Amino acid sequence: MRPIQMVDLRQQYEHIRSEIDLAIREVLDSCAFINGKPVQEFAKHLSDYLSCQYTIPCANGTDALQIALMALGLQPGDEVITPSFTFIATTEVIALLRLKPVFVEVDPKTFCIDADEIEKAITEKTKAIIPVHLYGQSAEMEAIMEIARKHNLFVIEDNAQAIGCDYTFSNGVRQKTGTIGHIGCTSFFPSKNLGGYGDGGALFTNDEELARRIKMIVNHGQKERYYHEIVGCNSRLDTLQAAILDIKLKKLDDYIAARKKAADYYNTAFAGNKKINTPYTAPYTDHVFHQYTLILEDVNRSGLNKYLAEHQVPSMIYYPVPAHRQNMFASFGGGGYHLPVTDRLSERVISLPIHTELDEEQLSYITRKVLEYIN
Ligand SMILES: *Cc1c(COP(=O)(O)O)cnc(C)c1O
């Protein structure tokens, strides 16, 4: 059996090595390392894939979130509603810009922000909502957009874990996550579903004016070279990453299918076990399984984690400490929150290996080891 990893980038690379190596060589030959042709080509292909008007590449997913908030022209002290149960980047950029993160509970089954809880957290200072499509399924976007319209708020989707996921509106219309809110953000970190071989990120919008501002912000706020309209930063996707991502984008749907197949295998193996809640997918969304995350009932989680590690099966806790309990947010009232669902999930979740290269032998071994410990 091949060694099991959380994400097997090496095996995936073996399958596309000749294409990737050729693309890298072409970039090296061109010496256009910054803003080379592949950057705009990849952005165009990604816009086509998502059916979205503007894709603006940037340096990483955290920058994408920060730039989105900058583009909306928010003022220090403005409030931004976000789940506490997420990767730190979502919430960190809010504080970095001297805005106030307001943490809201997640749905106990979907792990995504609870739309019913958003409205309760809205004040006169609320300016934006950042739903996170956690683990690869969409937050309840129709309800969230409705709340945003009613209260005149911006919506920034954190789509770092769900690129390629379809959301279905109640009228049957399907739309890719990341293109529904005013701005969508994603990451091309190597382990993401569409991952490069280094850092990368992008912003999506269908709003011409927001696209114009975002394009300026990623490039020092300049409209024309050396004429700076607004405060910006330097956040670029480099040409090598764009060339690699352009190849992997063509395979994204196959990669998603492979992840779903692995998730199906796990679901079948764990079905009916009272100590394991397998991932729930809400009816309005597809699931692209960036993570395969179980909720354990009455299981010693660190014991399971250790047992699996002893048998060469990696497992991870995403995320052991929710944002409202991070020291980082102590001065933002982090300690004052009562988010029992978030706390409960952070104590009980465990993620198993999921990637495009898992074979049946590995899946059978992993599930056997999990059940051995639990039963
Ligand atoms: C990965 C990730 C980010 C940040 O992306 P980077 O490219 O690592 O900066 C933001 N939000 C979520 C939910 C993520 O999973």
Image: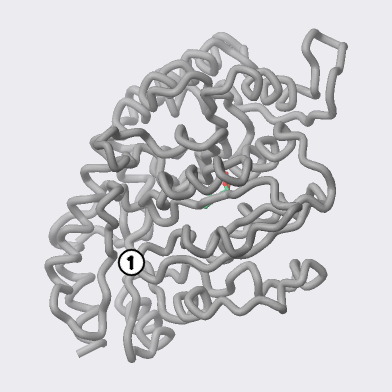
Point 43% across, 46% down: residue: 141
Q: For this view, does 208 lie left or right of residue 267?
A: right
Instruction: Pick the residue in front: 307 or 296.
Output: 296
The image shows residue 122 at horizontal and vertical percentages of: 65, 57
Q: Residue at x 37, y 51 (%)?
A: 136
Coloring basis for residues? one colour
- Binning the other alpha carbons within 10 Å of mark 1 as few (below 14), some (14 to 19) or many (20 upward) gives many
Q: Position of residue 351 (x, y in %)?
A: 37, 67
Q: In the image, what residue occupies the spot 66% across and 76% down?
A: 337
How far across and how far down the image is residue 335, in percent? 72, 78
Disc 1 marks which residue? 352
Q: Is residue 68 left or right of residue 327?
A: left
> Taking 126 as reference, is 238 left or right?
left
Split into 4 quadrants, where in the image is the N terminus?
bottom left
Residue 201 versus residue 51 in the image, above or below: below
Quadrant hosting residue 333: bottom right
Specify the quadrant that holds the C terminus. Answer: bottom left
Q: Is residue 24 visible?
A: no
Q: Nearer the viewer, residue 218 or 372?
A: 218
Name the outermost residue toward the front.
Answer: 150
Coordinates of residue 349 in the picture (x, y in percent): 40, 74
SS at mark 1 in the image: strand
Toward the viewer: 327 or 284? 284
Amino acid carrying label 1: it is Leu
Q: Note whether ligand 1 is within 8 Å of mark 1.
A: no
Q: Is residue 250 above or below residue 304?
A: above
**Residue 310 shows in the view:** yes
Count of numbered circles in the view: 1
